Image (tube, helix red, strand yellow):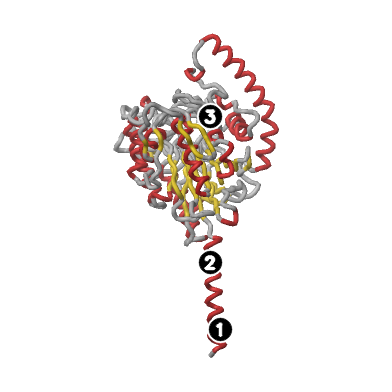
Amino acid sequence: SLAGGQQQQEEQQQQQDHALSYENTQELTLLVSSDWHSAPWYQMDGKGMPAGSSVTRFRNCTYDNMWSCFDHDGNQAQCRVTGINDPPRAFVTTHLQAFSEKRQKRSPDSPFAFLFIGDTQVHDLNAEYLNGMDPAVVVRDIINATLADVRRHFSPEQIFYTAGNNDGPHNHIFAHGKGHDNETDFWAQALIAHGIVTNDLGWTYSSSSSSSVESGGREERTSSPRPSPLLSQVELFQETGYYVKQISNFSGPTECGLFVMITNTNLGTSNTLQNNAIRTDLARVEDCGGYVYFLGHHPMVTPLLVPTKYTPLIRGMLSGHIHKAYSTFKDGGLWFTQVGAISQDAFDTGFYVGRVGEKTDFRLNLNYDDDLYIYTDEPGNAPNASLWELRPSGGGKGGGEEDHHMMTILVVSVSIFAVVVIGAVVTALCFRSRIPLWYNPVPAVGVNVELEGNNENPPPSHSADGDKAIRAGDATSSIHKINDSMMEARSHHELQTAL
């Protein structure tokens, strides 16, 4: 009948409206984790390394017995975690499994991706502790095994993988470009071979290390006698560790979409090749109306890599390194999140699960009390994916917004004092040595932090592991205060003299 046909049309329209509403409000689910420090040789009594180390490693380690766990008597056994050390691979993989299982239950049809903020490798991956093995071969085997684990849960286009200071050569991955050390080259080759770093966007970059001048949101290079060769995305990555990818399985505010920019903070803030590429890509995204999630391992470096004019594009900035989690907060126009660790040698052993979409204006806003999954088992037991649970609100070791604000107030005077003292010492050393500050073994606070300079790629002004001079931080920045306070407060196992 006519009435029946009209009712059917109305039902069909309602279904279409519902489908359209679902499409417009669909969320992208993100696993965010950092600082895995996966231990290839795990001694379950917590011994086997120098006192104060976060590593428990059996002495007879070889290529053949990588990813094994040994008991106190030296017998290979099922892995059981100590609760205080860099964990075995079997523990690291449980958080990937836990995310997959929880995502399947909550939103099996929604798109998802993985943001890793750096530090795949265990601490103390030095030749003196490797029983004659080649560190480069060990790096190669660790990164390939780890990426194989990740690929079981994510396709290559869903993986956004950052270099930390415990990746490749300690503190110096990509510090000297391609071909300088096998550790860097093997690490880079693994990400390329697994399809994580590609030339899919077709973007190219100048290979010149001279600075660029911004004009109207676009990049204009300083003139040179002959044009510099152009680098592909993969070639730039092999030189610097920097790359950019579009989130392919989720639409952004415009056809331009959403991008993830993965930086290498081991280069500090004065690597002109990386800095030029960052500005070039931010200008590209601005021109097409997209947004960016910005990743960098060191919290004291990452915010300094974004020129102020581009801060509205950044829908989330994330760092790791200090093994402590904080809720997202706004600092200088940037929405910054401090990510905890998967390593059990941490204040917060946990991972974040975030959701972004049109409802959130695509901003990644993570809450310590609502979005942080922590491991809930006692030491001495085998790793179990089902034991990753949402942190009880108000429980745990701290890191929520109230804790952050109190810590900011308490640490500001100490930070100012530390900066003054370090400044005096650095000035005295500078006059005494009469050499550029960036040649000092311990980098000084505030050296080469401006992105607009024209440094010809000096050694990194902010090297690695939160050197004490860097830990003093900048008393005017909340991010620096977090880093400073955390490093000062790490009486818990001293968390490796330098993370």
Residue for point 66% across, 43% down: 401
Numbered disc in front, either 3 or 2: 3
Mark 2 highlights which residue?
20
Q: Nearer the viewer, residue 77 or 272?
A: 272
Instruction: Give the residue at x 63% y 18%.
Output: 421
> Residue 457 location in percent, x, y?
44, 25
Amino acid at the residue labelled 2: Leu
Which of these two is toward me, 305 or 324? 305
On screen, residue 165 versus residue 322, left or right, reads left
Question: On the image, numbered disc 3 is attached to which residue?
Answer: 452
- Image quadrant where residue 396 sits: top right
Question: Which residue shows up at 43% across the image and 29% down it?
Answer: 223
Tags 3 and 2 in contact by the CB under 8 Å rule?
no
Where residue 310 sits: x, y (%)? 56, 40
Q: Nearer the viewer, residue 336 or 16?
A: 16
Residue at which label 1 appears: 6
Q: Secondary structure at mark 1?
A: helix
- Secondary structure of residue under mark 3: loop
Q: Contact, CB < 8 Å: mark 2 with mark 1? A: no
Label 1 environment density (alpha carbons within 10 Å; few <14, some 14–19, many ≥20): few
Total labels drawn: 3
Q: Amino acid at mark 3?
A: Glu
Structural crowding at the residue carrying mark 3, measured as other residues with C-alpha within 10 Å and reported as few (<14), some (14–19) or many (≥20): some
On the rendered structure, is 63 left or right of 78?
left
